[in-house]
Image (cartoon, rainbow, N blue to C red):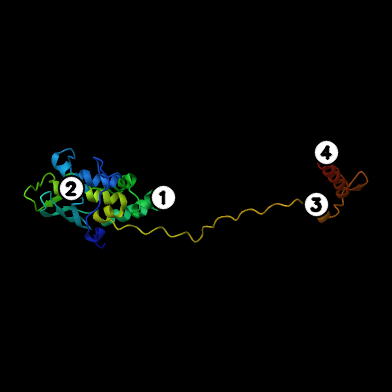
Amino acid sequence: MTARLLEDGAPLAVETHDARIGAGPWARWLASAAVPDESTQRAERGRRLAQAGAVSRVIVSEGSIAARVTGTTGNEYEVSLAADTVPPSAWQAAVRAARGHGGLERAVAGEAQSVHLAHLLETRVGAHLAPTAREIRRSCTCPDDEPRGACKHVAALAFAVADAVDRDPSLFLLWRGCPPADPVPADPWRAGALPAPRQTRALPTGAVLRRLGRSGIRAGGVDLADALGRAYDAFAATRAGPA
């Protein structure tokens, strides 16, 4: 898969001012795994940096998210989030299992975030769609870099990309090494929609009997078709008359 430079390298715009950035499950998993404790002062400073547009030159590739983060003093730092990707065989198995299931098909195509896809991967092939906090390797060139936690620049990157994942879920799949599946081709044997029914037109009284002709069966000295014709005429006259 090809690495993607978000917004042509321009700062990512995080428009929400909520205390929690990332609405969908994939966005939340990324943010909470990269920033295990979002209640710390470092996390809060990172949130403010993300909302201030301090995260730029964001490159998302297989297993890596890298960016430049401008600190509150104006210094620029190189920041990254790395994690081992989902095994290709596990992802292909998930793609096959998703066929015919609308919500899962949208998820493997990178069009929607899905908890069910993560559950499918875990239960069917024992793989994890999202890495845990311990599986993420954080890196920052600032002097406050914390290998076990997240400095404010790492937090800013995590929050900014989580917000981007809400707009484009395929970014999460790219990071996890999961090529978005192509849309399912249309079934050539499936018929199209039925046309609208034509307006019905009532047949003249006795039209069916005249088309069938004589029956050869006599009732009351006359052919059955003639007897039924008289009955139909009587019914028609009754329906046409005043109520």
What label does residue 102 carry, if any?
Answer: 1
Which sits in the foreground, 123 or 118? 118
User: Which of the two labelled residues, at mark 2 and mark 1, occupies the earlier sequence position?
Assistant: 2
What label does residue 49 carry, if any?
Answer: 2
Residue 45, given in percent of the width and then of the height, sits at 15, 43
Q: Is residue 232 visible?
A: yes
Q: Are marks 2 and 3 in contact (CB under 8 Å)?
A: no
User: In whole angstroms, how far apart are the C-alphas of marks 2 and 1?
Assistant: 38 Å
Mark in front: 2 vs 4: 2
User: In whole angstroms, how far apart are the C-alphas of marks 1 and 4?
Assistant: 57 Å
The residue where tag 3 is placed is 204
Amino acid at pointer 2: Leu
Q: Is residue 127 visible?
A: no
| Image position of 221 (left or right of 175) | right
What label does residue 189 carry, if any?
Answer: none
Amino acid at pointer 3: Pro
The residue where tag 4 is placed is 242
> Which residue is at a point 82% across and 43% down the rendered structure image?
240
Q: Residues within 10 Å of mark 3 (few under 14, many from 20)?
A: few
Residue 166, given in percent of the width and then of the height, sits at 30, 49
> Which residue is at a point 39% across and 48% down the rendered structure image?
103
| Image position of 91 (left or right of 50) | right
